[in-house]
């Protein structure tokens, strides 16, 4: 099954930023390295889904994570889509950090 990899680093600035967006029939899963986080830092990771071709993204789930992480590799479980998933990150407290990420997009 052909796959595409999306990876890189993202520097926080207080706004909600897109880590990865899938707009075709694929699944998405991957990792976010939270090791830069320190006490006083807080981030929110959000997952939005779209269930019709001309639809809008709707919030599926969010996770608020705070402080230094003893297990810093955060895994986002595989999610299939026909029309779209979007995964975002926002730092809401603390010193702005840079986070590495790696996602795989797999045909469904």
Image (spheres, helix red, strand yellow):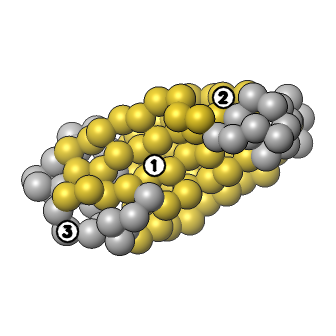
13 on left or right of 88? left
Q: Secondary structure at mark 1?
A: strand
Which class describes the residues within 10 Å of circle 2: few (<14), some (14-19), or many (20+)? some
* Relative height, residue 60 to residue 53 (above, below): above
Q: Earlier in the sequence, mark 1 or mark 3?
A: 1
Q: Which residue is mark 1?
A: 32
Give the residue drawn at x 67%, y 56%.
Answer: 6
| Residue drawn at x 62%, y 45% as measured from the top left | 86
Total numbered labels? 3
Residue at 50 percent across and 51 percent down: it is 88
Q: Nearer the viewer, residue 17 or 101?
A: 17
Observer-nearest residue: 78 or 16? 16
Q: Is residue 2 left or right of residue 23?
A: right
Dot in front, 1 or 3: 3
Name the secondary structure under disc 2. strand
Identify the mark nearer the N-term, 2 or 3.
2
Residue 66 location (% of width, % of height): 20, 44
Estimate the spatial distance between the alpha carbons at disc 2 and disc 3, rounded to whole Å.
31 Å
Q: Which residue sits at x=82%, y=41%?
A: 54
**Marks 2,3: beta carbons within 8 A:** no
Identify the residue position indicated by label 3 in the image: 95
- Which of the pair 103/59 is nearer the observer? 59
The residue where tag 2 is placed is: 79
- Tell me residue 82's x, y (percent): 82, 32
């Amino acid at each position: 099954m052909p796959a595409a990899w999306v990876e890189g680093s993202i520097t926080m600035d207080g706004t909600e930023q897109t880590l990865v967006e899938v707009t075709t029939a694929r699944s998405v899963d991957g990792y976010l390295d939270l090791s830069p986080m320190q006490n006083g830092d807080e981030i929110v990771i959000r997952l939005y889904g779209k269930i019709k071709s001309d639809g809008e993204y709707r919030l599926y789930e969010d996770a608020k994570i705070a402080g230094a992480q003893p297990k810093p590799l955060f895994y986002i479980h595989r999610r299939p889509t026909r029309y779209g998933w979007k995964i975002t990150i926002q730092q809401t407290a603390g010193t702005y950090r840079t986070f590495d990420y790696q996602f795989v997009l797999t045909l469904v």
